[in-house]
Image: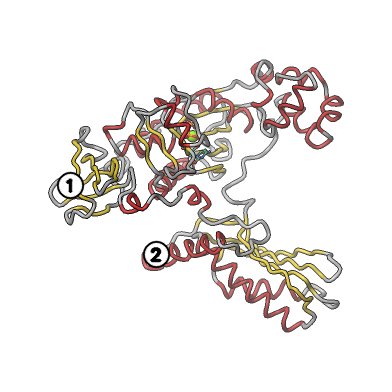
Amino acid sequence: MRTAPTILHLDMDAFFASAEQASKPSLRGKAVVVGGLGPRGVVSTCSYEARVFGVHSAMPMAQARRLAPNAAYLVPRFGLYRQISEQVMGLLRELSPLVEPLSLDEAFVDLEAGGTAWDEASALLAGKRLRDDIRAVTGLTGSVGLAACKMLAKIASEQAKPDGLVLIEPGTERALLAPMPVRILPGVGPATGDHLRRGGINTVGEIAEAGEDELVRLLGKAHGLALYAMALAHDERPVVAERDTKSVSVEDTYDVDIHDRVRVRMEVQRLADRCVQRLRGAQLSGRTIVLKVRRYDFSTLTRSETLRGPTDDPAVVREAAARLLEAVDTTGGVRLLGVGVTGLADYTQEDLFAQAQAQAQAEAEAQAAADGEPEGLGAEPVAAEEAVEEPEPVVERQWRAGHDVRHVEFGHGWVQGSGLGRVTVRFETPDSAPGRVKTFRVDDPGLEGAEPLPLVAPPVGEGLRRSPRP
Ligand code: DCP
Ligand code: MG
């Protein structure tokens, strides 16, 4: 393990709810709950003001309403959150090429690999600057943990919440972990936690005391050894750059084994095309092409080829897949074929028209996936987080709580609520004072839907608000 606290973990504070508060001045300092508002809706997250009442992520919305009846209830606006996430991830990539996002609002960064930090003082400085920059660029706060390994960097950012920074000095890890509940360790969910408790182990220190053999006896070899190592603060997991471990892929299983070599080739071409469609839909490109073949006897082979640079060109993927197939013996027949692309990179598309098309494609793919199209080779579902957004009751479909609107006379605002043929709008913008509320008929011709406004007005001179670099 490294000797300097140069692994950084960032986690934005109450992410969706903070974005809503930044967007809507009247909600700042108030209880805000974001999630599905339909009958089976669950809480995505809530502001710290709402957490005081016991509301938390994944709680049924009905329960949240009982606990915090006066909170503002809003549906998520994923487009806005994704934009903010991209800004934040951009700032992280300025620190190091080794950035490992875990979700829209959370990532590890290897500061040492980026040459940004090499000891405690430089790591602390980088962490402080990052927090300032995030605030300047997005208007939101994020908490930062710094430590010599991933596990502790994440624990540190948890301790730093909200709006703080915690650095764990190398050498102090075991003492720090010892009194903590076992659930703090990665890989300890409710089931493992219960299991350990029945074995008389409640804290991380007790895992260390129990010893390796006892852990293996309780949890089996792989899990036991891994957990014992974590309890001793041994965590050598590297920060893995974005998407390196993920893939986009498609596969088909055939009812009848395919014997005809020409037909096999055709199927592989078809799968390559579908894979590229999916890749483009997710606005990605990748360097490694993977072919998967399951033969008549269930023996399964994967073959891969890594290109010089990332591609999303159907011809390139088709050719690579065909080359890989040439090296595979299919006499006897195949029952499954798959084509995948890994080593993914963000795909930047200048052409707005193509971008719109890619978006439509991603939506179609997500729809197809939802309709039960088979997913292959552990494919990442495109826009999975969209699934949280559920259909609203009919009256609210047009005027969804929390979404932006524009009125010809009163300007920009957001839907505070609707029902009984009326819609209530609060007219305010991210940089205005808290605004006034007005009620309209749902079919008011002066009212229309609008795009979210940026939370921070774009700087006049680029970088003016960012912290100075030496
Ligand atoms: N999220 C979700 N459903 C969950 C958990 C989270 O939709 N069950 C979404 C909403 C969160 C975002 O992911 O805003 C980030 O999740 P976090 O766990 O980081 O929670 P928050 O950022 O909201 O709060 P915290 O300050 O505790 O990090
Ligand atoms: Mg968070």
Q: Provide the residue designation for mark 2.
A: 356
- List x then y, in percent, for residue 176: 64, 17
- Residue at 79%, 76% in the rendered image: 257
Numbered disc total: 2
Q: Write the residue at 45% across / 59% down.
A: 348
Amino acid marked by disc 2:
Ala
Q: What kind of element bears circle 1?
A: strand
Quarter of the picture containing the C terminus is top left
Q: Nearest the camera: 191 or 236?
A: 191
Q: Which circle, 1 or 2, is nearer the viewer?
A: 1
Q: Which residue is mark 1?
A: 411
Q: Nearer the viewer, residue 302 or 78?
A: 78
Element at label 2: helix
In x, y percent, where is residue 270?
63, 76
Vertical arrangement, residue 155 with respect to residue 365, above or below: above
Q: Residues within 10 Å of mark 1 (few under 14, many from 20)?
A: few
Q: Position of residue 2 (x, y in %)?
A: 66, 30
Q: Residue at x 45, y 49 (%)?
A: 389
Q: Residue furthest left?
A: 409
Depth check, front residue: 128 or 422 = 422
Left or right: residue 72 versus residue 310 is left
Rounded to the nearest angstrom, the CA distance separating label 1 from label 2 is 27 Å
What is the crowding at mark 2: few (fewer than 14 residues within 10 Å), some, or many (at least 20)? few
Q: Earlier in the sequence, mark 1 or mark 2?
A: 2
Disc 1, disc 2: CB below 8 Å?
no
